Image: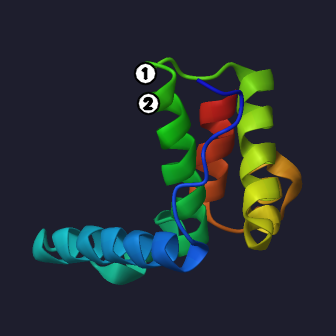
Amino acid sequence: MSDSPTRRASLEVLRAEAADELAVLVQERLHGGEDPWDFMEELPSVDELVVFLLRADEIVERGGVRPDQPRNFEVLRRIALDYPELTRVVWSLLGNGPKYRRWDLLADDARS
């Protein structure tokens, strides 16, 4: 087991997988009778979901052990290095980006 996550696929493939996942989430919520104006801001972007999926891969590789704060920083940093197009998203997830969605505030609460 290495210290950095293994690059699993091209960014285009990861984005396609994430877009499919988001489409399923939207469909489920619509079928549940929710108004898209109420929930769309709560959902992560495609790139945010890609970062979450890559982070989840790291957790699985470590036997399901969630990373502590320093390890989480290192995992996210490695994702940004492996996928430079995700750098801005990684930094925003680390708390260095603008907070304009209710979801961002919920993520901050989870980190506390």
The residues tagged by marks 1 and 2 sit, at their Cα atoms, a distance apart of 5 Å
Q: Which residue is mark 2?
A: 60
Mark 2: give few (<14), some (14-19) or many (20+) Cα within 10 Å: few
Query: Vertically, is 53 above or below 34?
Result: above
Which quadrant does the C terminus fall into? top right
Q: Which residue is mark 1?
A: 64
Q: Are marks 1 and 2 in contact (CB under 8 Å)?
A: yes
The disc placed on residue 32 is: none
Residue at horizontal 52%, vertical 55%? 8
Mark 1: give few (<14), some (14-19) or many (20+) Cα within 10 Å: few
State left or right for residue 95 relative to residue 112: right
**Looking at the picture, how far across and down is residue 91, in whole percent?**
83, 55
Say which element carries label 2: helix
Residue at horizontal 67%, vertical 32%? 111
- Disc 1 marks a residue whose amino acid type is Gly
State the residue in front, 38 or 8: 8
State the residue in front, 94 or 100: 94
